[in-house]
Image (cartoon, helix red, strand yellow):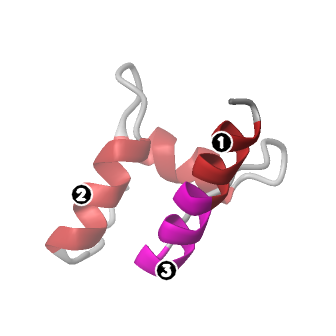
């Protein structure tokens, strides 16, 4: 039996990035919902990314 799930275009794009080349969307969702394989899903907001870049720059400067 098959079920359709509606997702936004943005969500579909996120799922596309997580999906392995050799797996179906059903397999992807099963993997994401599995307790067996922990995954990190998400993204940094621009402030967090900027702070990370600044920390990397400071770290590189300390080696000069």
- Distance from the alpha carbon under mark 1 to that under mark 3: 21 Å
Is 60 situated left or right of 20 in this image?
right
Question: 10 and 23: which one is in front?
Answer: 10
Vertical arrangement, residue 62 with respect to residue 52, above or below: above
Instruction: Give the magenta range.
Output: 45-54
- Distance from the alpha carbon under mark 1 to that under mark 2: 37 Å
Mark 1 vs mark 2, foreground winner is 1
Tell me which secondary structure the magenta stretch mostly adopts.
helix
Q: Residue furthest front?
A: 64
Question: 61 and 16: which one is in front?
Answer: 61
Vertical arrangement, residue 48 with respect to residue 31, above or below: below
Q: Horizontal and vertical percent for residue 18?
A: 43, 44
Q: Residue furthest top?
A: 22
Q: Quadrant of the N terminus?
A: bottom left
Identify the secondary structure beneath mark 3: helix
What is the quadrant of residue 31 in the picture?
top right
Q: Residue at x 41, y 75 (%)?
A: 46
Residue holding disc 1: 61
- Distance from the alpha carbon under mark 2 to that under mark 3: 22 Å
Q: Residues within 10 Å of mark 1 (few under 14, many from 20)?
A: few
Q: Horizontal and vertical percent for residue 42?
A: 54, 65
Mark sitting earlier along the chain (1/3): 3
Mark 2 vs mark 3, foreground winner is 3
Q: Residue at x 34, y 58 (%)?
A: 14
Q: Residue at x 22, y 71 (%)?
A: 10
Q: Quadrant of the C terminus?
A: top right
Is 64 situated left or right of 41 in this image?
right
Residue 43 visible? The answer is: no
The mark found on residue 13 in the picture is 2
Residue 24 visible? The answer is: yes
Residue holding disc 3: 47
């Amino acid at each position: 039996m098959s079920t359709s799930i509606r997702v936004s275009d943005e969500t579909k794009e996120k799922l596309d990035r997580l999906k392995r080349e050799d797996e179906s969307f059903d397999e992807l969702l099963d993997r994401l919902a599995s307790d067996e394989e922990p995954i990190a899903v998400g993204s940094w907001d621009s402030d967090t990314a900027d702070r990370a870049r600044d920390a990397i720059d400071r770290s590189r400067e300390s080696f000069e």
